[in-house]
Amino acid sequence: MKDRIALVTGASQGIGWACAVELAKAGARVVGAARQQDKLASLVEEIRSQGGQASAVELDLRSSDSIQAAVAKAREIYGPIEILINNGGVTRDNLAMRMSAEQWSEVIDTNLTGAFQTIQAVLPGMVRARWGRIVNISSVVGLAGNPGQANYVASKAGLIGLTKALALEVASRNVTVNAVAPGFIQTAMTEALDEKIRERILDRIPLKRMGSPDEIAAAVSFLASERAGYLTGQVLSVNGGMYM
């Protein structure tokens, strides 16, 4: 993927950060997008220190204007986006009967609608070029469900449906659309979990450990590469065997 132009949303930490670094190592020119500009500056510095090419743009996935502006700025820096990694997302957990309308809409608007609008912003360029890679970051819970996360589960399951529908629409233009569904990954979010909860999670994972952001990034990098040209509409589960 040397010199391919990649946009990674939610790149300021965790899986998004790892994906941006991995794509840069593979030769892509990476644009990291998120709200936290200080963290994105650190990401750009890390990639450049390793000899890669990277820039940053501010992005709020709940704002269609912000999405359009971020994609336009990325295009000004490097050119039309050829690889999109839809990773940005939030959680607002609560039991369904206690979940507020705001908790529901914030997660759906960010994780699903924001991803869709980002796709809409970059897709015309991919179709014109007759080459593109879109990778949506879903979740094991989008496949298996999880109590207390009706909003998050719905958003991640929705991303899988979006992946399949879009893959059918754009396959004739040599644009592939796939999803990666991570299991429990060692991030700041999981590090904050109570020890008993962590133990219960590990009991459900055959490999008896959480995954690393780098392991997700490796799967994403493959799907974004020329080598994955005959893969589209697929969900690659990277979850240690937690859900098969």
Image (spheres, helix red, strand yellow):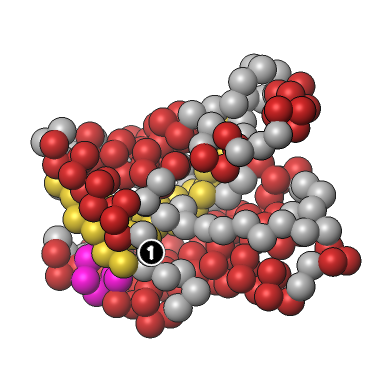
Where residue 50 sits in the image (x, y, percent)? 15, 33
Q: In this view, does 59 lie to the left or right of 26?
A: right
Extent of the magenta region: 70-74
Q: In this view, does 223 lie to the left or right of 237?
A: left
Which residue appears at 44% of the width and 42% of the height? 14
Which residue appears at 27% of the width and 64% of the height? 57
Query: For the residue labelled by badge 1, is the local secondary structure a helix, a strand or a loop?
Result: loop
Q: Nearer the viewer, residue 209 or 219?
A: 209
Q: For residue 97, what is the image quadrant?
A: bottom right
Where residue 139 sits in the image (x, y, percent)? 61, 45
**Callout 1 crowding tier (Cα within 10 Å): few <14, some 14–19, many ≥20:** some
Q: For residue 181, what is the image quadrant?
A: top right
Where residue 61 sits in the image (x, y, percent)? 46, 69
Residue 119 in view in this figure: yes
Q: For residue 58, what is the image quadrant?
A: bottom left
Which quadrant of the figure contains the N terminus? top left
Q: Which amino acid does label 1 sit on?
A: Arg
Residue, far right:
97
Which residue appears at 66% of the width and 17% of the height? 208
From the image, tell me which residue sits under label 1: 35
Q: Is residue 76 left or right of residue 94?
A: left
Residue 237 in view in this figure: no
Q: Is residue 108 found inside the magenta-colored segment of the image?
A: no
Q: Nearer the viewer, residue 134 or 44?
A: 44
Which quadrant of the figure contains the C terminus? top right
Which residue appears at 56% of the width and 58% of the height? 90
